[in-house]
Image: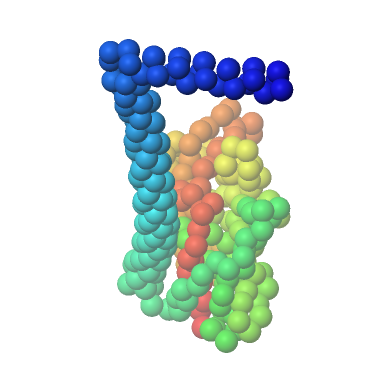
Amino acid sequence: MKKIRNILLLLLLLLVTLNIILLIPGFKSSIYNVSNFFNQIIHNIESTISNSLGFLADQKKLVENNNQLVNKNQSLEDNNTFLTNQINELENKNKELESQLELEQINHDYEYINAEIIQRNIESWNKEVTINKGTNDGVKEGDGVLYKGILFGFVSDVEKTYSHVTLITDPNLSQKLPVSSSGAKSTQGFLKEYNENTNTFIFEPLSIENSIEIGDLILTNEYTKKIISGIEIGIVTNIEGEGANQKIFVEPTENSQNADYVTVITNG
């Protein structure tokens, strides 16, 4: 009974204390202000979170749009590269056709067959190529092959639809290739010893006494097998020594490292 009485007295004391507190002027208003303060804080937090979520959504959309633009730009770059390659290919083909037309106007005794290089291996880059014309097109073994009007090589093997061409830069072919020089007095000799590192041949004149000068062109002559005389091969770029010790360096006139189209010359 004593414990119950104590509990009842404690409750009564709490009620009295609460009533007294509520009677204090401005207390209710303070409680209301505190409540409004915390409500405002909660509202601000909610607004910040909402704005942040909206910002993140906008950023995601911007990233998606940017990715779309990047993809479109890459597609345009790829198309531009493709078109540029097509233009370069057409320009090379056009130059080869122009060279072929010039030759046809000079000499009507030969047939000119335009061909495309379809294979050129890294390990034999300066030795051999394969073209897409063969016996079905009139190509024969030994026919001369030009690139932009410059001697490129000779057909070494022919099949029905394709042919192998040995290049003049193949050491086995350039060894003792009969040629002549241009200039005031033509000098006959041989083209030999192609050097891949310097991109030069050695011109060996038949006579020690010669009038070779830097800038002279080296051309095919009547002794060059199955090819029109006067076809350009290279240009004299350096002369070292004199007499029997003289070395005449010849650089190919045209850079054929990236040749795509060539012309086969056949005499029918």
Front-most of 124 and 11? 11
- Residue 219 visible in the displayed image: no
Q: Position of residue 44 (x, y in %)?
A: 34, 30
In this rendering, would 37 be left or right of 215? left
Tell me if residue 246 comes above or below residue 166 in the rendering: above
Residue 67 is situated, as x and y percent measured from the top left of the image, at 42, 50
Q: Relative to 60, say whether 19 is above or below.
A: above
Task: Look at 64% across and 34% down and name the residue there.
Answer: 244
**Residue at 37% across, 49% down:** 61
Residue 254 visible somewhere in the drawing: yes
Q: Nearer the viewer, residue 74 or 155?
A: 74
In this view, the residue in front, 78 or 206, is 78
Q: Image quarter for residue 26?
A: top left
Query: How far across and down, in percent of the image, does residue 267 sit?
Result: 51, 78
Seen at 37% across and 73% down, the residue is 104
How far from the left and from the top, in percent, is residue 117? 55, 67
Depth check, front residue: 92 or 252: 92
Q: Relative to residue 25, is residue 188 drawn left or right?
A: right
Q: Residue furthest front?
A: 1
Residue at 55% across, 38% down: 249
> Is the N terminus in the top left, top right, bottom left or bottom right quadrant?
top right
Report which quarter residue 84 is drawn in: bottom left
Classify 9 as above or below 248. Answer: above
